[in-house]
Amino acid sequence: MPPSREPNRERVPPTPGTGLRQRLAELRGPAVPPQPLDARALAALAANPGCRRRAILDGAGVNKAVLASALGSPSAFGQSQFAFMRGNAFEARVKADGGAELLRLVHERLDAQAEPPTAGAVPDLTAVGPEGRTARTALALREATAAGGWTLLDHPLLALDVAGSPAFLEPDAVVVHPDGGWTVVEIKSFPMLDGSADAAKVGAAARQAAVYVLALEQVAERLDPPPEVRHTVLLVCPKDFSNLPTASAVDVRKQRSVTRRQLERLTRIEDIADALPEGTCFAPDLPAADLTAAVESVPATYAPECLSACELAFHCRDRSRAQGAVTSLGRSLRAELGGLTSVGDVLSAARGESGDPADPTVAALRRAARLRAEALGVAAPVVGGAESRATGPDPLAGGPSPLAGRTGREGAVCP
């Protein structure tokens, strides 16, 4: 009688990324819903790729505004309810009647050689979950490209790999041209006066649109042949002080290149998570001491620019100042000081207590200290064991910084 054979039961391999998603959920807190990572956050993350703290918090979907409040350093971020309602009303007007006005602006500003849009298609992009919406968007883009007409995708969902973790992005609109090209449309509620808008706001919109362009390029690469993702986006704003839409073409090639390079420099989220202590959790309902210890277990790279881009900026600034980090005074000053990474090292070098006199940075600091002492009529620092002729209190013991020269950010000065 042949021996009985057990059925061949092979272990089903885990779905790729399942372990990472579970680990990120544990970091966020089991009962805490994830905060979506939008294009604005990605643009800010790309502007500071060396900050591991922001990378892991954004990757885990931690609500940094809630976290900052729990740490006792609430942020000043947010949009007023009036501005939010005004923006929604303006966007609804731009997209009314099947996006006829929006398609007209795209044709007028970006593709005047094509046939004028008469009745553009607006496909339904609803699906279950972000993965389903992303797949539905990719299918709609493929069908619209093959159709060869004007198509408006209202709030499509795109996926972009960021340091090994997917980020789901939702642009205001994507337009497919008759030639198969794809254009990102950004709709903002700030006015365009006499054909121009605030440069800072336009720059922020361009950086945000560049993230959408990168995500669209990943979708296009999966098609054969890949369609053209246009690097000129359409920025739609209210005209003057009215609610009438007007538009301007914005070239985002520079912003796209910078954002892509910076995102590629990000340390993979798995590596950051593996380096954290066991049991690390950023749930906002934890005791303040435990939450602070968890946040401080991840190194941060603070700079004054973080104040306009990150909800944790006030907390990180306080820690950076307490540590005497030169970076808290500005990246440009940090670059000029070379190996002197703390304020204590800078003052010690200026006093002549440390540093190589042949180092140009050290020499400039000591010269600045001598000039300051002469201007104030106090004793110059002791350099090389020789005291100055003047007498008086140490000029570097207090008062303004001895780094005389041009003024930097937050009152910092450099030689």
Image (cartoon, rainbow, N blue to C red):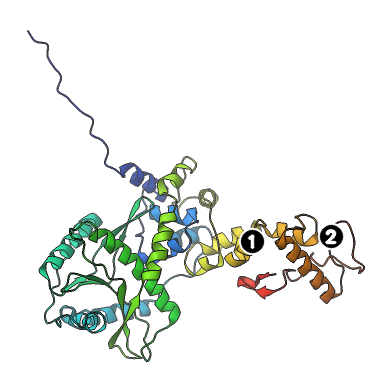
Tell me the residue that label 1 is attached to: 326
Task: Please say if 384 is above or below 290.
Answer: below
- Residue 1: x and y in percent read 7, 7
User: Which residue lies at the image location 32% right of the left edge and 63% below the top edge?
Assistant: 214
Numbered tag placed on residue 267 in the rendering: none
User: Which residue lies at the image location 28% right of the left edge and 88% below the top edge?
Assistant: 244
Q: Is residue 337 visible?
A: yes
Numbered tag placed on residue 383 in the rendering: 2
Q: Is residue 342 left or right of residue 172?
A: right
Task: Please say if 142 is above or below 79.
Answer: above
Q: Nearer the viewer, residue 98 or 152?
A: 152
Q: Earlier in the sequence, mark 1 or mark 2?
A: 1
Instruction: Indicate the amino acid at tag 1.
Output: Val
Q: Is residue 63 visible?
A: no
User: Which residue lies at the image location 36% right of the left edge and 58% below the top edge?
Assistant: 35
Q: Nearer the viewer, residue 295 or 15?
A: 15
Distance from the alpha carbon under mark 1 to that under mark 2: 23 Å
Instruction: Indicate the amino acid at tag 2.
Output: Val
Q: Quadrant of residue 87?
A: bottom left
User: How many residues crowd mark 1 within 10 Å: few (<14), some (14–19), many (20+)?
Assistant: many
**Of the residues tagged 1 and 2, which is closer to the observer?**
2
Q: Residue furthest left?
A: 1
Task: Please say if 54 is above or below 76.
Answer: above
User: How many residues crowd mark 2 within 10 Å: few (<14), some (14–19), many (20+)?
Assistant: some
Looking at the rendered structure, the secondary structure element under dot 1 is helix
Q: Is residue 145 left or right of residue 109?
A: left
Q: Is residue 65 left or right of residue 358?
A: left
- Residue 156: x and y in percent read 23, 66
- Residue 116: x and y in percent read 15, 83
Q: Quadrant of the C terminus?
A: bottom right
Looking at the rendered structure, the secondary structure element under dot 2 is loop
